[in-house]
Image: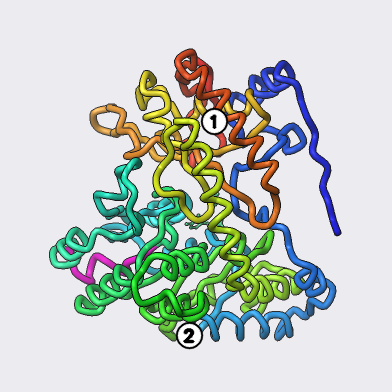
Amino acid sequence: KSVEPLRFTTRAERQSILRKAGYNLFNIHADDVLIDLLTDSGTSAMSAHQWGGMIEGDEAYAGSKSFSRLEQTVKELTGFRHIIPTHQGRAAEKILFSIVGGKDRIVPNNTHFDTTRANVEMSGAEALDLPIANGLNPALKAGFKGNMDLDALASVLDNEGPQRIPLVMLTVTNNANAGQPVSMENIRQTAELCRAHGIPFFLDACRFAENAYFIKLREPGYENKTAREIAREMFSYADGCTMSGKKDGLVNMGGFLAVNDDQLAGRARNILIVTEGFPTYGGLAGHDLEAFARGLDEVLEEDYLKYRIRSVAYLGEHISAIGAPIFQPPGGHAIYIDAKAFLPHIPPHQYPGQALACELYLAGGIRSCEIGSVMFGKFDPQSGQFKPAPLEMVRLAIPRRVYTKSHIDYVVESVENVFRKRDDIKGMRIVYDPPVLRHFTATFQPL
Ligand code: F0G
């Protein structure tokens, strides 16, 4: 019913575009991109039912009907008492961590994604990643590589206690760990550990529906449950969550913070009024709230989820078949190419992931995203030594309900072209290095 044109460019044009963009794909105009796999965030196609809701959206400043619908949908799904709308996920994080974060505090997570880490750190707290060992082994095929390391968590909770740990978070699916799912057992055990220490437990729920579907496919005892029942059980163990509706809300903009704690909710709403808007719209238009409520229902339809998980796996299987290394098994929203194994001759401080992402753009006009030492690498402030990220990856994130199989086949062909010439690819050096979330604005030069 609705299409968007695609525009081809030549390799010579792309060379010049890339140079002008400082070899940072975030600086390229979308018009100059053929297949845009930069992110699955806010890039979904909405359904006719959601577009219908855009027209019906109630724009009342206070007490909007569309907010009531979103609130009802989220309460019914999560069971949380207070639903606080925000314009996107990071606004929920900012509000939460400006209340519970602060100097000398530690926030453990299976793996923080970039904005979550940045919001924890901006509050003065430490963002501590505790992924399981298997989660750092790209080639290993195992079911729930997104899990939290429970022994490591237990020892941090024993040593630091609730004075220093305001909450524990689990990111489902684990985006910085290749979109790998977290098992129900791991969610339950993380919650039990938190409860035993009197520490609240939160989900970073951006991709809760994809995680629920992996549980259905892989965890014994869940094969006959619906994705909705599984999602409800996931939320039932938590005291609250942050959510970016731009992923599994199937909307272009939207998010929320949900909590059970009345006091925390009160403080959050006070900040919300100052920074986002009144508590019944929180930085969103009524039509956004309406589309978001409808998206949260649609995302749990199993015909959709089956196609979603299967089509991402299709891309992964075909890249593997040409011999190129990917993080195994395929995750929920993206295929992560293992840039360390793809380009073993480029050391982490020469950013193999960035080099590969640029080559993919040159080869086929495909935009991807480095998730490696550009995003998470650091220079030690004392020694000045470079501390690389644990993994060097290039993420091919698949927008929901957007591309067809032939688009994806074209991506595979482009990866194959780059893979054949991999020995000639050179590393990169950073020219401009901004102080926070540097992957968005840094500029580079090929070595
Ligand atoms: N948490 C996770 C796990 C995320 O992946 C993101 C966003 C956020 C929080 C923040 O949400 O963008 O609505 O403010 N991830 C996007 C990505 C940007 O490309 O993976 P937001």
**In the picture provided, is 93 more to the left or to the right than 387?**
right
Q: What stretch of residues is rendered in magenta?
A: 160-170
Q: Spatial distance from mark 2 to mark 1, Cα to Cα?
A: 41 Å
Look at the picture and state if 398 lies above or below 417. below
Could you say which disc has been placed on residue 357 in the image? 1
**In the picture provided, is 413 more to the left or to the right than 129?**
right
Look at the picture and state if 10 lies above or below 294. above
Q: Identify residue type, mark 1.
A: Ala
* Image x and y of residue 148, in percent: 29, 60
Q: Is mark 2 within 8 Å of ligand 1?
A: no
Residue 78 appears anywhere in the view: yes
Find disc 2 in the rendering and name its residue: 79
Depth check: give the residue in front, 102 or 51: 51
Residue sticking out furthest to the front: 321
45 in the magenta segment: no
The total number of labels drawn is: 2
Residue 172 location, quadrant: bottom left
In this view, the mark in front (2 or 1): 1
**In the picture provided, is 267 more to the left or to the right than 104?**
right
Name which residue lies at 48% across and 62% down: 93
Residue 415 location, quadrant: top right
Could you say which disc has been placed on residue 100 in the image? none
Q: Residues within 10 Å of mark 2 (few under 14, many from 20)?
A: many
* Image x and y of residue 61, in percent: 74, 79
**In the picture provided, is 233 more to the left or to the right than 3?**
left
Depth check: give the residue in front, 356 or 60: 356
Q: Residues within 10 Å of mark 1 (few under 14, many from 20)?
A: many
* Image x and y of residue 441, in percent: 56, 35
